[in-house]
Amino acid sequence: MSDTFSDPPGSTIASAPTLYRHSGKVSPASLVIAAVVLIPLGVLFGAIYSAAVVYLPFIKLRGLVTFFVGGGFGLIAGSLCFKLKYRSRLMAFLTVIGFTAIGYYSSWAVHPALVIGPGELGGDFVPLMIQGFDPIVILGWMKGIFAEGIWAMGGGGAGALSGWGAVAIWVLEAALIFGTAYVSGMAAYGNRPFCEHCYRWNDETEELAVLPVSTTDPAWMQIRNGNFDALKKLQIASDSDAAYVELRLADCPTCDESDYLSAIGITLTVDEGQLKKNETDIFRHLSVTRAQRDEIVDFAAAMAEAVQLMREEEEALNEAATDEDELPTGDPSHPNEPAP
């Protein structure tokens, strides 16, 4: 590893490296495929969810189903956006929300037929499900629930929820479905860089290096501005067991035009007996040259070895101190006690 990191030819302080941003490109073919896949899936899953809400006997179980349905909508749409190589978080967001909206609308559309039941409707069951997709039918059904109620909250069918109480349940249900869909969808889509030259997502290396340093070290600003020699100026923090920094690389394995460095602050906390890893970005996906990338990898390996040696020396000192404390009083081997 060299004493200084390489700079690209002609680089200056003014030409600081940039943080990655998606190009915003989404191919028309990807949009068509997304529509062909997600529209029928949304209708199907919406109908399944509506049936679960109607036929499940326990209110708490219905709430749990609502939570998982929202997460499922997001997971499917976000994963598909990633597979179809959306390079636009806005379009990924709109796809997730659109798919969720189709499913939620479909759940309302088939709800009247499911509540009345196939036994009572007979041959009109399927036609009523199809008719339910008319927004006027959905609005009329909602007005009926508002006026007379439909869900039996008490025993024997008494206490059916209606009026503004029903509206509150609808709002809570929609918020839960769309909220969990958004969180799971954008997590499934991810935020890794895309190599336009090779038309593929970059590979991201988790924990390239674990640095026992503070997230507030002034050297990070220099690194963010392109002075990678400042990595060697980072000061070891005293509380590095509970808080440290991870260096991560995202690079294209088939070319040298799409390399990015991330520095993520990690804080370990204990919540209800479970160890939680909380992340805070110092910077994420900072552009680097291939030469700088290779030297950062070498630096990370050297730092890992140095940290390991430091910990081994610290453990050896702690063991020596423990052994000395455990020596009995008057032991001839104890340097401060006379032999009897």
Image (cartoon, grey):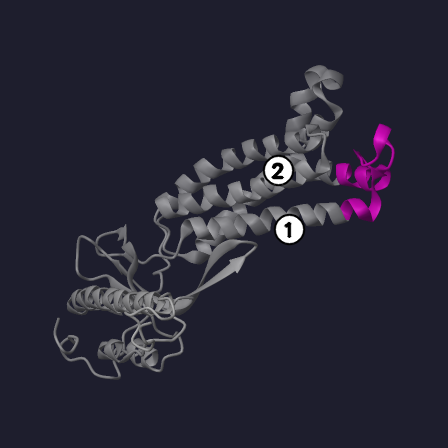
State the image quarter where residue 127 is shown: top right
Query: Horizontal and vertical percent for residue 300?
Result: 23, 66
The quadrant of the rendering that contains the C terminus is bottom left
Q: How far apart are marks 1 and 2 (CA)?
A: 14 Å
Most common secondary structure along the magenta stretch: helix
Left or right: residue 260 compared with residue 25: left
In this view of the protein, which residue sits in the foreground, 112 or 124?
112
**SS type, badge 1:** helix
- Among the two numbered marks 1 and 2 on one chain, the one whose residue lies closer to the N terminus: 2
Left or right, 232 with respect to 117, comes to left
Reading the image, the residue beneath label 2 is 65
Magenta region: which residues? 140-167
The quadrant of the picture occupied by the N terminus is bottom left
Q: Which of 292 and 254 is in front in this view?
A: 292
Residue 13 vertical position relative to residue 22 in the rendered view, above or below: below
How busy is the neighbourhood of tag 2: few (under 14 within 10 Å), some, or many (20 plus)?
some
Q: Looking at the picture, which amino acid does disc 1 mark?
A: Ala
Q: In this view, does 157 lie to the left or right of 104?
A: right
What mark, if any, has residue 175 been given in the picture?
1
Badges 1 and 2: C-beta atoms under 8 Å apart? Answer: no
